[in-house]
Every structure is written in structure tokens, then in C-alpha cells.
Image (cartoon, rainbow, N blue to C red):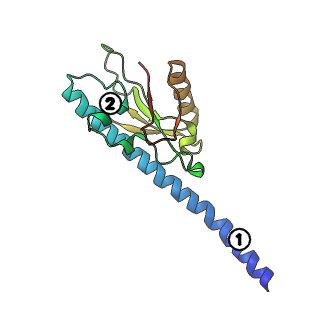
């Protein structure tokens, strides 16, 4: 009798735990998307205050109190290790043509969302989910330009920028 009850409980946990993890990932994705939306608003405000110039890094937005420090870290990555990953920020070069769909900020690593892709904030303020092949390509291109992916392990915001 006890063996049958144990087997039933084991089967129940086997069905419920993956659903709980999936729900946790969906909440993390939603929080990450919201962070990027807030970052877009902060960048817009910064540009308005600085004659159209982009900030050099996300920390600049925090220092000018346009962005809360917590918005510079993705809530989803490395959930098993209790860390939160950062975002990569690549401001356009001064005098570059306006490319509204060019990426501006994205998750710093594929691990941010368990290798399923990542969010990308475009220069026009749009936030898109990009699936692994294209997201991996974007991270590779940014790495070639000098961007470094690093999880946040301190109280400081984690973002990396490329000039």
C-alpha cells in the first residue's frame, strides 16, 4: 500500500515540477522584457536631456537616476545558482545613420533564459524575443566587437557596452 502511494506521489511530483519551472521561466521572461522596456524609456529620456546622444553605458542611466539599478539585470538567468545576469548594450557610433531595427540592448548570455533565446531591445524601442540560432549569432557578432558577457555577482549593475 505504501509503495503504491509513494509511486503516485512520485508521478505527481514528476508532472508538477516541470510545470512549476516553466512558470518560473515565463515570469522571468516577462520581467526581463519589462526591464528592457524601462531601459528604452530611460535611454529616450537621456537622449532628450543630452542633445540626442546615447549614453555610453547603462550605468550612466543609473547614475543620472533615470533607471533603477535593478533594471540593469535580467531576473531570469542562472536561476539555479541564485545569480542574475546582465544585459549587453551597444550604443551606435556617433554620427551613425539611424537604423531603427538595429539591436541596442540584449540579454548578455544564452543562459539568461536556459538557452531558449533572449530579448533584444531595438533602437526604435521595440523589444523582440529572438530564438537561439539568431540570438547566438547576435551574441557572437557583439563579442567580435568587444562586448563581454558576464553574470552579475555583485550589487553593482551588470551591463557591458561596446563603442
- Asked which quadrant contains residue 103, the reply is top left
> Residue 70 appears at what percent x and percent y?
38, 45
- Extreme-front residue of the structure: 155
Q: Is residue 1 above or below residue 13?
A: below
What residue is shown at x 79% (from left), y 86% (from top)? 1
Q: Earlier in the sequence, mark 2 or mark 1?
A: 1
Near mark 1 (Cα within 10 A), the count class, few <14, some 14-19 or many ≥20, is: few
Gap in Å between the C-alphas at discs 2 and 1? 50 Å
Left or right relative to 136: residue 69: left
Q: Nearer the viewer, residue 48 or 16?
A: 48
Q: Nearer the viewer, residue 110 or 56?
A: 56
Left or right relative to 119: residue 22: right
> Residue 44 appears at what percent x and percent y?
26, 32
Disc sitting over residue 11 in the figure: 1
Residue highlighted by disc 2: 60
What residue is shown at x 39% (from left), y 39% (from top)? 127
> Residue 48 appears at what percent x and percent y?
20, 29
Q: Secondary structure at mark 1?
A: helix
Q: Is residue 24 above or below residue 45?
A: below
> Residue 147 appears at what percent x and percent y?
50, 24
Near mark 2 (Cα within 10 A), the count class, few <14, some 14-19 or many ≥20, is: some
What residue is shown at x 30% (from left), y 34% (from top)? 63
Left or right relative to 112: residue 59: left
Amino acid at each position: 500500500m505504501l509503495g503504491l502511494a509513494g509511486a503516485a506521489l512520485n508521478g505527481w511530483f514528476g508532472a508538477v515540477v516541470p510545470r512549476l519551472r516553466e512558470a518560473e521561466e515565463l515570469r522571468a521572461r516577462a520581467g526581463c522584457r519589462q526591464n528592457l522596456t524601462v531601459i528604452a524609456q530611460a535611454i529616450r529620456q537621456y537622449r532628450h536631456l543630452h542633445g540626442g546622444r546615447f549614453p555610453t553605458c547603462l550605468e550612466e542611466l543609473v547614475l543620472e537616476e533615470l533607471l533603477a539599478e535593478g533594471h540593469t539585470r535580467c531576473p531570469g538567468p542562472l536561476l539555479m545558482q541564485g545569480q542574475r545576469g546582465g544585459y549587453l548594450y551597444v550604443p551606435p557610433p556617433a554620427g551613425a545613420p539611424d537604423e531603427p531595427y538595429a539591436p541596442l540592448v540584449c540579454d548578455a548570455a544564452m543562459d539568461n533564459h536556459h538557452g531558449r533565446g533572449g530579448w533584444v531591445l531595438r533602437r526604435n524601442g521595440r523589444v523582440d524575443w529572438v530564438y537561439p540560432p539568431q540570438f547566438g549569432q547576435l551574441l557572437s557578432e557583439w563579442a567580435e566587437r568587444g562586448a563581454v558577457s558576464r553574470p552579475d555577482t555583485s550589487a553593482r549593475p551588470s551591463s557591458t557596452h561596446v563603442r
